[in-house]
Image: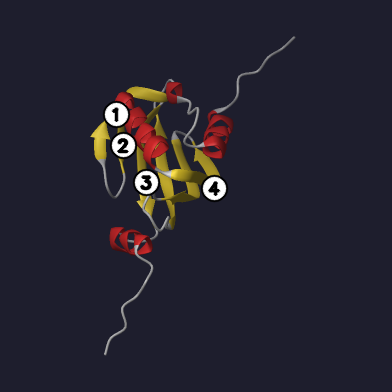
Amino acid sequence: MDQTQPTLLEILRQDYDRFPNDQTYSIYAADVFFKDPLNEFRGVDRYRQMIGFIQQWFREVRLDLHHITQDGPNLRTDWTLHWTTPLPWQPRIAISGWSELITNEQGLIISHIDYWHCSRWSVLQQHFPWRSSSP
C-alpha cells in the first residue's frame, strides 16, 4: 500500500484546525525565527512554550484559516485567531492577520512572522468593551 506523506500545506491546515492542540513542531527548524507584534525570538522550544501558554491560559481558542498559498520556499496564511480571556467578564477576542513563513532546503520552516490587521491597542480595548461617554 502506497502511503504518501502529507504536504506542508496539508500539515499547516490540520494544525490551524486543531490549534493550539497537537501542533506539528517537527515542521519547524530547531532555530526557527518567530516574530509577532508581541514577541520576537528564536527556537522551536520557545515557540512550543508560547503555544503552551496560549493553551493553558486562554479559553475557547480557535484559529480560522482563510487562505494559504505557497510560492517556492515562501508561504502565506491568512487567518483570524479567537479566544476568551480568563477575566471575570470573559471577553471574547478576535485578531485577524497573516503569517509569512519561509522554508529551508529540507522543507522545514526557518522563519514565521505574524502580522495583525489591528493594533496592539485595539486588542487591549477588546478586553474592556465598555465605553465611557464624554460629557
| Location of residue 44 with respect to 92 vertically, above or below | above
Residue 105 in the figure: left or right of residue 39 = right
Residue denoted by label 3: 114
For this view, does 85 lie left or right of residue 64?
Answer: left
Question: Visible in this render: residue 107?
Answer: no
Distance between the Cα atoms at labels 1 and 4? 23 Å
Answer above or below: position of 135 versus 105.
below
Residue toward you, 52 or 26: 52
Label 1 close to label 3 by CB (< 8 Å): no
Residue at left offset 49%, top offset 31%:
21
The front one of 108 and 82 is 82
**Residue 87 appears at what percent x and percent y?**
36, 52
Mark 2 or mark 1: whose residue is earlier in sequence: 2
Amino acid type, label 1 = Arg
Residue 81 location in percent, x, y?
46, 49
Determine contact: label 2, label 1, CB under 8 Å. Answer: yes
Q: Mark 2 points at which residue?
A: 34
Q: Distance between the residues labelled 3 and 4?
A: 14 Å
Task: State the residue at coordinates (53%, 43%).
Answer: 69
Secondary structure type for disc 2: strand
Question: Nearest the camera: 68 or 131?
Answer: 131
